[in-house]
Image: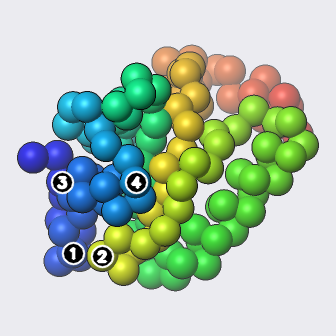
Amino acid sequence: MTGVTHDGMAVEPGDALAALGFRAVADPMRLTGGWDTLLWRFTADDGSDHVLRCFHLPGAADTARRERIALEACAVAGLAAPGVEAGGEFNGLPVFVLSWGPGTPMLTLLDKRPWAVRQLCSLFG
């Protein structure tokens, strides 16, 4: 089982994916990161990789709405950001399916190369 219980609420990624119209070909893999969200990477039955993102903190609906708007604005502007492929609610929590972005997560990069923080900050303005 790859699910978790958070604040007494069970989050089973396979059930959340099914509610959004996705079927994983194997158990979704829990990812670390995302302080305000629970994340799982999965491969859909068409062979493509995705991320299930579950917002679980108080005020999650507003946070999820703002995040979706930001990601969709990035897509319109042609910026590299995960695409929102589906969204909705599962067990009363906002959930998204996002496209998988290959590469090294920012926190992993900074953990391995902390001296690069100044350079990365200047790149991001």
Residue 19 pos. (x, y %): 34, 62
- For the residues labelled 2 and 1, say whether their Cβ atoms are less than 8 Å apart: yes
Amino acid identity at mark 3:
Gly
The quadrant in which residue 116 appears is top right
Specify which label sits upstream in the sequence, 2 or 1.
1
| Residue behind mark 2 | 91
Q: Which of marks 2 and 3 is nearer the N terminus?
A: 3
Q: How far apart are marks 2 and 1 (CA)?
A: 8 Å
- Compared with 68, 75 (above or below) is above
The Cα–Cα distance between marks 2 and 4, rounded to whole angstroms, is 15 Å
Mark 4 vs mark 3, CA separation in Å: 18 Å
Label 2 packing within 10 angstroms: few (<14), some (14-19), many (20+): few
Please give the residue where the numbered disc 1 appears in the rendered image.
9
Disc 3 designates what residue? 3
Amino acid identity at mark 2: Asn
Distance between mark 1 and mark 3 Cα atoms? 10 Å
Which secondary structure, mark 3?
loop
